Image (cartoon, grey):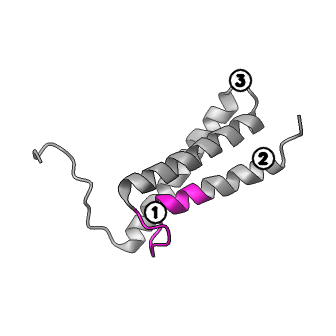
Amino acid sequence: MPPFVASRDRNLTQASKSTAVIVRFGWRMAAIAAFAVFGGIGFQRGLTVMLWMSAILGAVSAVFDREEPLASALNHWDEAMAYAALCCLAGAFQAPM
C-alpha cells in the first residue's frame, strides 16, 4: 500500500477504542439532532428516520469492518444497537397516524 494512504490498522487499547466510539456516537447524535431540527417533516418523525438509518449504517459498518458483536470493547455493533434503541424509544412517543 502506498505510504500516503491511511491505514485502518491502529494499535489502540480497549479503553481508547471505547472512548473513540463514545465520542463518535456523540458527534453523530449532534448531527442527527441538527438534521432533524431543520428537516421538513417535523422533529419527531425526522429523528426517528435518522436514527433508523444510523442503526442500519452502523450494522453495515460493523459487517464491513468484520467486528465481533459481543467484543470486550465498544464497536460499531454497540453503536448500531444504541441507535436502534433510541429509534424504538422515539417511535414509541410518536403520535399514531
72 or 17: nearer the eye?
A: 72
Q: Was residue 26 drawn as part of the magenta stretch in this picture?
A: no
Q: On residue 40, which mark appears?
A: 3
Q: Quote the CA–CA distance across marks 3 and 2.
A: 18 Å
| x then y, percent, for residue 57 | 51, 46
Taking the image as shown, residue 1 lies to the left or right of residue 29, namely left
Residue type highlighted by circle 2: Gly
Q: Was residue 78 drawn as part of the magenta stretch in this picture?
A: yes
Circle 3 residues within 10 Å: few <14, some 14–19, many ≥20: few
| x then y, percent, for residue 86 | 69, 53
Q: Quote the CA–CA distance across marks 3 and 1.
A: 32 Å
Q: Secondary structure at mark 3?
A: loop
20 or 47: nearer the eye?
A: 47
Which residue carries the number 1 mark? 75
Of pointers 3 and 2, the one earlier in the residue sequence = 3
Considering only vertical position in the picture, is 93 above or below 37? below
Residue type highlighted by circle 3: Gly
Give yes or no for contact between labels 1 and 2 (Cβ–Cβ under 8 Å).
Answer: no
- x 27%, y 54%: residue: 8
Considering only vertical position in the picture, is 31 above or below 11? above
Which residue carries the number 2 mark? 91
Of pointers 1 and 2, the one earlier in the residue sequence = 1
